[in-house]
Amino acid sequence: MNRRKFVTFVAISGAIAYSTQFLTNLPLIGTQVAQADTEKNETLKNLQAAYNGESNAHHRYLAFAKKADQEGYKQVAILFRAAATAEAIHASNHGVVIRQMGGTPTAKIETPTVGTTKANLEAAIAGESYERDKMYPEFIQQAQKAGNNAAVKTLDYAQESEAEHAKYYRQAVDNLETWKDVSLSFYVCPECGYTTSVLNFEDCPECDTDKGLFLQIS
């Protein structure tokens, strides 16, 4: 084989080998793309579920606040209104990320079941505890797996706030009659929904928003 034929043979062989390797890698590339799409869809589905849940919680807590007012539990009513404000902030934050991902935030608002103030507090504790201990941790883990930092952030904000809500609801149940005689304010971070009864910090413990921007609910 002369030199020109040899060079041509080597070039063709190399091209065939490269093409074969490229074609071999195509299924792997396709699998990776499909997996990324699946993770994105799962994150979007979780955000939609969280958006729906927070939107309904907002309406439910407003109804609970009205009932607490009717029964004379002024402090409990203030707490429910503060929590309702926080849930609206969570829903708004979730909605922003949903839109960034190309989706449309959708909520199916259901008529809340309203009982006595004590029963409403117990129901609220159950709901917040579920979101704090199961729903949001699972959603956050999935969003981390998908590499969606914006989703992780808004979900984490909500989880931290739900923990505070559950704590205050428990205090209200345990001191229900005492809470009937007071009407102290609660404060809600406009950025992340963090809820507190005392502004004993300069910046929000969760998102660093200046405490001067907190919404006073009374």
Image: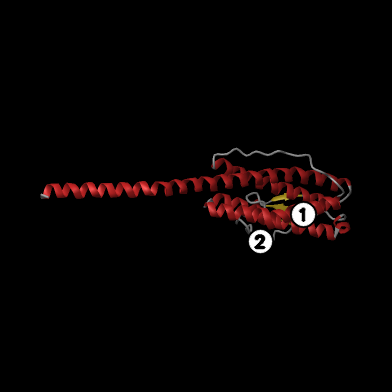
Residue occupying image coordinates x 54% and y 42%: 100
Q: Is residue 64 left or right of residue 195?
A: right
Picture disc at residue 126:
1
Figure check: 208 above or below 103: below
Residue farthest along the left direction in this orientation: 2
Residue occupying image coordinates x 70% and y 45%: 53
Report, in whole angstroms, how far the alpha carbon at label 2 lies from the one at label 1.
29 Å
Give the image location of residue 81, x and y in percent.
76, 47
Secondary structure under badge 1?
helix
Give the image location of residue 197, x and y in percent.
74, 57
Whichever of callouts 2 and 1 sits on the residue coming sooner in the sequence is 1
Q: Is residue 154 left or right of residue 120?
A: left
Amino acid type at mark 2: Phe
Q: Determine the image quadrant of residue 98.
A: top right
Q: Is residue 167 visible?
A: yes
Q: Determine the image quadrant of residue 56.
A: top right
Figure check: 100 above or below 148: above
Q: Which residue is mark 2?
A: 201
User: Which one is in front in this view, the residue at disc 2 or the one at disc 1?
Assistant: 1
Amino acid type at mark 1: Ala
Q: Residues within 10 Å of mark 1 (few under 14, many from 20)?
A: some
Picture disc at residue 31:
none
184 or 11: nearer the viewer: 11
Q: Residues within 10 Å of mark 2 (few under 14, many from 20)?
A: few
Figure check: 207 above or below 65: below
